[in-house]
Amino acid sequence: MINKQAIGIFDSGIGGLSVAKAINTLLPNEALIYVADTHYAPYGDKTDTFIYQRMRVITEQLIAFGAKALVVACNTATTAAIDALRKEFSLPIIGVEPGVKPAVQVSESKIVGVLATPRTLLNPAFATLAQRFAAQASILLQPCPLLVPMLEKMQVDAQSLEPVLKHYLAPLIEQGADTLVLGCTHYNFLAEQIASIASTLAGKEINIIRTEMAVAKQLQHRLQHAEILNTALLANANIKLYSSGDLALFQRQVQHFWQTEATVLAL
Ligand code: DGL
């Protein structure tokens, strides 16, 4: 079956591109429309009310562009207001949550570190998630407020990143964490650096938990269930990437973080 509508995906900025990339790998027959809300990034220092307003505006825009399903490719936005968004809009909506469950499963020390934005970690929805696993493991929380702004500015050279990552990772390793959850989609682009610095600090290999492929699989399941999954290649299954911010910068970000032929457009 061929459904010409696209999958709408959004994030405060480039983080959700890691999710879009996984969706494109798993579901190459689907057209994708991505919105980076760069003008308002980071969401991590905004209120839930503000984030929800942006989620509504972007969802309406993506529906107007022809989205058949929506992926909130942002942990901060998911914890802030995905329930309210689902009540308001009837299309399938998939969110992103820090992978605490898989982390607890693989951790041998049963000490797990969660790296995320301050807003995600302070949210009651995250507290409920962490609470579910509190009996099985110690869940250490590490807010990383500098990372999203650095990635958005493409300050990703080793010299800039290393001291910041060490500052965030050292306390987790000192407390015995052997597994780290990347609880912000932006951090997927730092997975290798985080793994390398954490493993060096620990003197052994540290597990890194990312969730973008699990999100892509969940989307596949929801599309199948709603009978809107493309089982054959759509003639123009293209990828359109929109940004509400500086388009020249967005173009450079996309080239650096994805290397795709996708069209880059102003929102
Ligand atoms: N990628 C977003 C997340 O997963 C970043 C949020 C922000 O803009 O602070 O949380």
Image (spheres, rainbow, N blue to C red):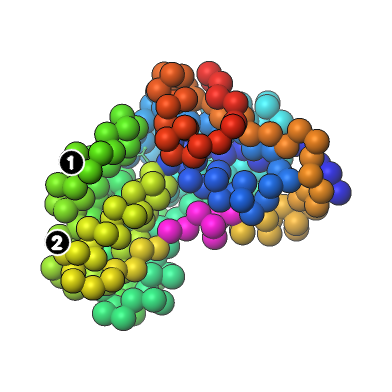
**Ligand 1: image quarter:** top left
Tell me which residue sits at (71%, 31%) in the image.
66
42 to the left or right of 166? right
Residue at image location 76% in from the left, 33% down from the top: 236
- The spot of residue 127 in percent (x, y) is 34, 60
Secondary-structure class at tag 2? helix
Residue 213, relative to residue 50: is it above or below?
Answer: below
Residue 252 placement (x, y as % from top left): 42, 27
> Which residue is outermost to the right?
1
Instruction: Name the amino acid type tagged 2.
Output: Pro
The picture quadrant where one finds residue 208 is bottom left
Q: Quadrant of the C terminus?
A: top right
Label 1: how many residues lie within 10 Å, few (<14), some (14-19) or many (20+)? Answer: few
173 is higher (above) or lower (below) than 253:
below
| Location of mark 1 (residue) | 159
Q: Quadrant of residue 43?
A: top left
Q: Is residue 80 left or right of residue 206?
A: right
User: Which residue: 43% across, 58% down?
Assistant: 210
CB under 8 Å between callouts 1 and 2?
Answer: no
The secondary structure that most of the magenta stretch takes on is helix
Q: Residue at x 82, y 48 (%)?
A: 232
For residue 147: magenta? no
**Magenta segment:** 210-216
In the figure, is residue 261 to the left or right of 142? Answer: right
Q: Toward which corner of the image does residue 58 lie, by quadrant?
A: top right
Disc sitting over residue 171 in the figure: 2
- How far apart marks 1 and 2 lie (CA) works out to 20 Å
Total labels drawn: 2
Task: Choose between 226 and 155: the one closer to the eye.
Answer: 155
Q: Give the percent coordinates (x, y) of residue 149.
A: 29, 34
Nearer mark to the viewer, of 1 and 2: 1
For the question of whether residue 52 can be seen, the reply is no
